[in-house]
Image (cartoon, helix red, strand yellow):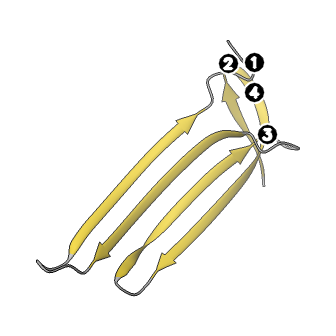
Amino acid sequence: GLETVTVDGEAVETLHVRLRGLESGGTRGSSLSELWFLPGTNLPVRWVEQRDTTSDSRIGEVQYSESFEATLLSLRPGS
């Protein structure tokens, strides 16, 4: 849905999209991606990602986890 995000001190109306993923087979796990887009564009204003997986290997199960958050610093190119 629509949500306000602050970019460089400016309130910006964005479209918030949440994606959940599940993996099965040799690699099992889940992920959650949240993206806030500037409406009418493909420009992500904010992106939060979390992924946790377990994979089979010769030495046993291997666990992997990653998370990150990225936020646009400015709506004006070159600023």
For label 2, the residue is 9
Q: Quadrant of residue 30 in the image?
A: bottom left
Up-down relation of residue 58 to residue 50 (above or below)? below
**Nearer to us in this view, 48 or 23:** 23
| Amino acid type, residue under disc 4 in the picture | Ala
| Amino acid type, residue under disc 1 in the picture | Arg
Q: Residue at x 56, y 58 (%)?
A: 33
For label 4, the residue is 11
| Amino acid type, residue under disc 2 in the picture | Gly
Q: Residue at x 65, y 50 (%)?
A: 35
2 and 4 marks in contact (CB < 8 Å): no
Q: Residues within 10 Å of mark 2 (few under 14, many from 20)?
A: few
Mark 3 and mark 4: span between their CA atoms?
12 Å
Mark 2 and mark 4: span between their CA atoms?
7 Å
Mark toward the start of the polypeptide (2 vs 1): 2
Up-down relation of residue 17 to residue 57 (above or below)? above
Q: Residue at x 50, y 77 (%)?
A: 22
**Nearer to us in this view, 1 or 76:** 76
Mark toward the start of the polypeptide (1 vs 3): 3
Closer to the eye: label 2 or 1? 1
Q: Residue at x 58, y 45 (%)?
A: 47
For label 1, the residue is 76
For label 3, the residue is 38
Looking at the image, which residue sits at the far right? 40
Q: Quadrant of residue 61 in the image?
A: bottom left
